[in-house]
Image (cartoon, rainbow, N blue to C red):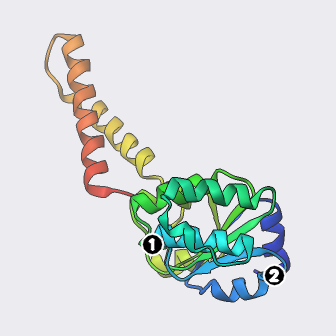
Amino acid sequence: MNLLRIKNHINQGQNLLFYNKDVHEIYKQLNNDHICAFFNDPSPIKARLIECIERVVNQKEPALNRLTVPELIKILLVKLNSQILVILFNNFHTLTRRLVGVYQELNRYENIIFICGLEKDFKKEAYGFFKTFKLVNLEQYKMETGKDEINVSYSIYFFLGLIGFIIYLKTATSANMAAMLLGGAWFGLIIFRTFVYTGGRV
């Protein structure tokens, strides 16, 4: 994706995810025209928020070290005002539940855009955040990992559970229809939950 298209996505408020690409190269191209904060790793989150604030105000702020993460987020939003901040980081796959929570909080604001690099499969707790991104080189991702970015697990599991329910109804010999329906629904639910537990994200 060329720089012009990347800028168009930024103007549209679209997060971008690049598979197997160092986004530092993109940072160097964008840094002259946008307020950008780049870090190779998304953690530690407190240090990353301080870096973002310092990029916005364009100076070091030693006093920020004493503040909590929620306080730093508030300061960042106040300092940023209506300006656009582009946050770039690699190693998307290292995101933890806590990190995702903070970045999702920032992602609620239209003037904060993320451009990230993904090298490996990410943790399931990052999936909600992942869905806010446009995966730029999708074909390469699918070719090299054998995966699609769309999570179809639950629809597949529901379908398999439904088949289990129908099979149960066909084979059950109980005369009590209510008990049959209840047993069939229970059997289908067990199949659904078993696939969710063992399969995770497709």
Mark 1 Cα shell of 10 Å, populated few (<14), some (14-19), many (≥20): few
Up the image or down, 154 lies above or below 9; here it is: above
Which amino acid, by three-letter code, is at mark 1?
Pro
Residue 66 visible to the viewer:
yes
* Residue 143 horizontal/vertical position (percent): 53, 79
Residue 202 visible to the viewer:
no
Q: Mark 1 points at which residue?
A: 44
* Residue at position x 66%, y 74% in the image: 54
Direction from residue 45 to residue 180 in the image, left or right: left
Q: Name the residue under label 2.
A: 3
- Marking on residue 92: none
How far apart are the two marked residues, 1 and 2, measured between alpha carbons?
A: 29 Å
* Residue 185 horizontal/vertical position (percent): 27, 26
Among the 4 quarters of the image, the one containing residue 199: bottom left
Q: What element carries label 2?
A: helix
Q: In which quarter of the image is the C terminus?
A: bottom left
Q: Is mark 1 on a helix, strand or loop?
A: loop
Q: In which quarter of the image is the N terminus?
A: bottom right
- Which of the two residues, 7 or 202, is positioned nearer the viewer here? 7
- Which of the two residues, 36 or 52, is positioned nearer the viewer here? 52
Among the 4 quarters of the image, the one containing residue 14: bottom right
* Residue 148 horizontal/vertical position (percent): 52, 66
